[in-house]
Amino acid sequence: STHPHSPTPRRFYTSCSSFRTPCTDLCGRALIRENPPCEPQKKGRSRHTLTAMLKRRRARRSSLGRSRSEAACIVLGIQARRATFVAIGVLLCLAGMANGTDLPEVVVGGVAVGAESVETVTVTGESIEVDGPATTPPQICNGANLPKPGSSFPYLSDPIPSDHPPDFNSFVPPGGHRYCEYLGGSSPYNITPSIRRESDQLARSRRFHVKEAMRHAWDGYKKYAFGKDELQPRSKKGSNVWGGMGTTLVDSLDTLWLMGLKKEFYEGRDWVRDHLDHDRVGRVSVFETAIRSLGGLLSAFDLSGDEAFLIQADDLGSRLMMAFDSPSGLPYAQIELNSGTPSNFGWLPDQSILAEFGTLQLEFRYLARATGKMSYAEKAEKIFDILYSLQPDNGLFPLYFKNTGEKAEFANKKISFGAMGDSVYEYFLKTWLQGGRLESTYRAMYDKSIQGLHDELVHLSHPSGLTYISERTGKKVDHKMDHLACFLAGTLALGAYTDPLGFNSTRAQRDVQTGKALAYTCYQMYARMETGISPECVRFSEKSSDDFSVDRRGSYYILRPEAVESF
């Protein structure tokens, strides 16, 4: 059909068979926006514990038995903001949360792999001279030692045996300032078919342990908190901080399916079918509920075809839709599921948040296709139509919008690819992909915003030259970067590989290089911490001797998935 208010024709619903392309995965965000990370605490705002930052919606089907293009799409990261329950499983497994083990409460993961001999070069001005072999990667990112272009990849290790003991007490983070060859977004190694086979073999050996960690985490959740929103690992009790909708259960279903844990999957299905009741749920965040609960139900339906999930998703979606009936067309932030009463947050009474109303389209468009109820898609797409009409010349939107008047208006001047701004830019791209790349307006909105990003917000740090993304309020630049902004590395790569101008175009090559360089910076945000775990945000300074420091408002970690998704 053609949307009457759209700048371009909509052919998204011409047929079910044309709906799915290799990258038609459902995506979402994971962010507690009622207490925005790295922002001062506002009076009356709740501070939730993110023990259930849940999965991404991109792997609708297992790549096993599917085409290579589908598998590549998953690897590239239909990269939403939810942390995979796999990540939670690994972290909580290490913390010994489920079965009362003696592992410490807070543990860091990761393994440093050995390096084979590589040739390095010394860069002096425009000349490159071979400096002889090195037995380890350079330890200081000063540009003095770099691998010779085309060198063999040196960082593979032996496969991990299945009886490898889960002893993480002896692990010591090896520190940052390593792998300097990736600093500027380059790829200096020759990845041969043999290297790929070795890498796949190593990954498969690790996959066994990841699956066991997931099984461990699910068993702990089932034993102590089954049907609850979250498991509190220290007290071994369940809590309902998301309205009592079994959020952990619902949003882990697709990971269970993809890992082949079908017994556990159908345990969850039975609870959804027999016990999930939205009539008992009061006020919830529209955004959080859409990405976790609605997205979880839809992904489970898409993978399994079980109608129990679609029935619940339709019921939930119809209740969330009541929040879309605002004068401006931008939805209210909250809805009472049992009464249908919408409202904005008390601390933002006449405004809504960019990344919240801009991160609903994938879920509701999919729900429209699955149910045949086009109103789901129309109301979600109207939001993008409004943004299209308001998009500034630089493509970058402020974080707050007035949504209670007849027309939507900007409500502040702050621009960020971190908290409260990030995922709208991601959804421009992925909504275009979801529609078979036919709705060119969405791609144009994405490309315009990424041009603005490069023109105004991309910087290099001192002294190493790490690529980072700043924030801006009016003309004032704030050199702070949230961990949330690490999503952009994967999104830039996905945009480059799907660029209508071609992957070899100047624009696509710029974007993939920025994405790689940003991914390296996000790695450094982990590696330079004593724990090996990244803070919520860091601050860059031209006067700093170590590129960045931990922002005083962000010296904590809440299972953020963005960096590992981009990797």
Image (spheres, helix red, strand yellow):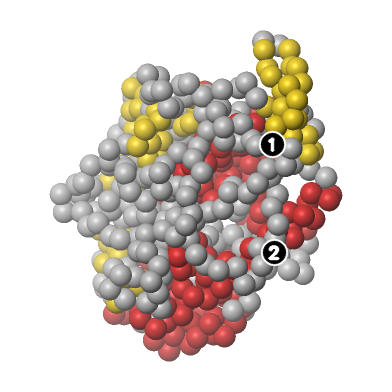
In percent of width and height, residue 2 lies at: 61, 53
Give the label, 2 or 1, closer to the camera. 1
Q: Quadrant of residue 336?
A: bottom left
Res. 105 mark? none
Q: Is residue 267 left or right of residue 276?
A: right
Q: Depth check: 223 or 194 in front?
A: 194
Q: Secondary structure at mark 2?
A: helix
Q: Is residue 248 left or right of residue 58?
A: left
In percent of width and height, residue 90 lies at: 49, 64
Q: Depth check: 301 or 110 in front?
A: 110
| Residue 383 visible (yes or no) | no
Classify 10 Å Cα crowding around label 2: few (below 14), some (14-19), many (20 and above).
Answer: some
Q: Residue at x 48, y 31 (%)?
A: 468
In percent of width and height, residue 517 lies at: 58, 33
**326 above or below 394?**
below
Q: Circle 1 is placed at which residue position?
A: 135
| Residue 200 visible (yes or no) | yes
The CA span between labels 2 and 1 is 27 Å
Seen as rendered, the residue at the extreme right is 193
Q: Secondary structure at mark 1?
A: loop
Q: Quadrant of residue 106?
A: bottom left
Q: Amino acid at mark 2?
A: Arg
Q: Residue at x 69, y 64 (%)?
A: 204
Q: Depth check: 377 or 560 in front?
A: 560
Q: Is residue 258 left or right of residue 328?
A: right
**102 above or below 477?**
below
Q: Quadrant of residue 183?
A: top right
Q: Depth check: 425 or 199 in front?
A: 199
Q: Circle 2 is placed at which residue position?
A: 204
Quadrant of the frame with the N terminus: bottom right
